[in-house]
Image (spheres, rainbow, N blue to C red):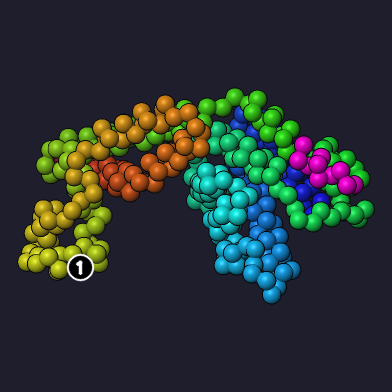
C-alpha cells in the first residue's frame, strides 16, 4: 500500500511543479497527471471494497456488489459513483471530478485546447485531488524495506518506510494543497470569459447568416436553416415526415414542409437567454457550481454552435468563390 501512496504522491508533486509554470503545455501535462492520480485512487478504493466483501463471504455484503463490480471496470463515472454512494466523497465532489475528467479526455483524446480555462481548471482539479487523497484511508496499511520510494516522495515520506508513513502521506497532501492555494487563479472568471467568447461567436454567426445568406433575412430564419440542413436527410427526419403526412414531391418542398412542421429546438434567438446564463455564472461564488454551470452551457449549446460555425464557414467560402468569379469576368 505504501508503494501506491508514494507513487501517487510523486505524480502530485510533479504536477505541482507543472502548475507553477506559466505555459499551457505544462498545465495540460499537470491535468493529465492529476487525472491519472484520481482514477488510480478511485480504482484502488474499489479494490478495497471488493476485498472487504469477499472477506466476509456468507454475510450480507457491506458494499453494493453491483456498484463495486462496475467500479472495477474501465469507466471513470462508475468509480466515482461507488466512492460517492459509500461516503468516500460527497455528491458535489463526484460531480466535479467527473466534469474535470471529461476535460482531460477532451484535451488528450480529442485534441481540444481549452487554452482560456486550462490553468484554472487544472489547478482546481489538483486541489480536489489533494482532498481526495487526504481522505483515503486504506483498510490495511502495509510497507516493507523492499519498496522503492520515488525521489520526489522521499521529500515528504523520508527514505525509509515506517508506521508513520501514512500520517506523513496525509500531511504531504495537505501541504501540496496549501501551496496550490497560493497560486493566483480565477476559475469562475475564466469560465465566464470562455462562455462569453462562445456567445459572441454564435451571435456573430447568426447575424452573418441573416444578413448575407440566400434565404430569409432574419436571425430566427438563420437558426432554423442551420438546424434544417443538419437534420433533413437523417432517418429520424424521414420517419417524422412519413408519420406526419408529408406529401412533398421535390426536395425543396420537403425542406419547406420540415421547416414549417418540425418542432425545432431553436425557433427564437437564444443569445438573450445565453447572456442571462453568463451573468448568473459571473456572480457564482461556489467554484463547484461555477464548473457545473459552465459544463451544462457548453454541452447544451454545443450542437447549435457547431451548426452555426459550419454554416457561416460555408457561406463565407461561397461569397469568396462568387467574388473570384466576378473578378474573373
* Helix, strand or loop for disc 1: helix
Give the quarter of the figure containing the N terminus: bottom right
Q: Report if residue 33 is visible in the image.
A: no
Quadrant in the picture for residue 326: top left
**Point 57% across, 51% down: residue:** 84
State the residue in front, 62 or 80: 62
Relative depth, front residue between 186 and 285: 285
Give the labeled residue for mark 1: 239
Whole-percent x, y for residue 264 in the image: 20, 51
Q: In front here: 281 or 326?
A: 281
Residue 61: image quadrant is: bottom right
For the stretch drawn in magenta, the main secondary structure is helix
Start and end of the magenta stretch?
Answer: 162-171
Q: Is residue 165 found inside the magenta-colored segment of the image?
A: yes
Q: Position of residue 89 (x, y in %)?
A: 60, 47
Q: Is residue 11 magenta?
A: no
Image point 18% across, 38% down: which residue? 219
Amino acid at each position: 500500500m505504501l508503494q501506491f501512496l508514494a507513487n501517487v504522491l510523486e505524480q502530485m508533486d510533479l504536477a505541482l511543479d507543472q502548475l507553477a509554470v506559466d505555459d499551457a503545455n505544462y498545465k495540460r501535462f499537470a491535468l493529465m497527471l492529476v487525472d491519472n492520480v484520481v482514477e488510480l485512487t478511485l480504482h484502488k478504493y474499489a479494490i478495497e471494497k471488493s476485498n472487504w466483501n469477499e472477506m466476509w463471504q456468507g454475510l450480507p455484503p457491506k458494499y453494493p456488489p453491483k456498484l463495486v463490480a462496475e467500479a472495477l471496470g474501465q469507466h471513470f463515472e462508475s468509480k466515482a459513483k461507488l466512492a460517492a454512494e459509500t461516503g468516500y466523497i460527497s455528491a458535489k465532489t463526484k460531480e466535479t471530478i467527473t466534469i474535470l475528467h471529461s476535460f482531460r479526455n477532451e484535451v488528450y483524446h480529442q485534441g481540444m485546447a481549452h487554452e482560456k480555462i486550462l490553468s484554472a481548471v487544472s489547478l482546481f482539479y489538483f486541489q480536489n485531488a489533494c482532498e481526495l487523497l487526504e481522505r483515503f484511508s486504506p483498510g490495511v496499511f502495509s510497507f516493507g524495506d523492499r519498496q522503492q520510494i520515488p525521489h520526489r516522495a522521499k521529500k515528504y515520506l523520508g527514505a525509509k518506510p515506517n508506521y508513520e508513513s501514512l500520517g506523513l502521506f496525509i500531511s504531504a497532501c495537505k501541504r501540496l494543497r496549501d501551496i496550490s492555494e497560493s497560486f493566483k487563479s480565477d476559475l469562475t472568471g475564466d469560465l465566464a470569459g470562455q462562455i462569453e467568447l462562445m456567445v459572441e461567436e454564435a451571435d456573430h454567426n447568426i447575424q452573418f447568416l441573416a444578413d448575407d445568406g440566400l434565404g430569409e433575412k432574419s436571425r430566427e430564419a438563420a437558426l432554423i436553416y442551420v438546424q434544417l440542413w443538419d437534420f433533413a436527410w437523417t432517418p429520424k427526419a424521414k420517419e417524422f415526415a412519413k408519420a406526419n403526412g408529408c406529401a412533398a414531391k421535390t426536395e425543396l418542398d420537403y425542406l419547406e414542409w420540415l421547416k414549417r412542421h418540425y418542432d425545432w429546438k431553436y425557433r427564437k434567438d437564444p443569445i438573450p437567454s445565453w447572456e442571462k446564463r453568463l451573468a448568473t455564472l459571473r456572480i457564482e461564488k461556489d467554484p463547484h457550481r461555477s464548473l457545473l454551470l459552465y459544463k451544462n452551457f457548453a454541452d447544451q449549446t454545443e450542437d447549435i454552435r457547431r451548426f452555426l460555425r459550419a454554416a457561416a464557414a460555408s457561406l463565407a467560402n461561397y461569397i469568396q468563390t462568387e467574388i473570384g468569379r466576378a473578378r474573373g469576368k
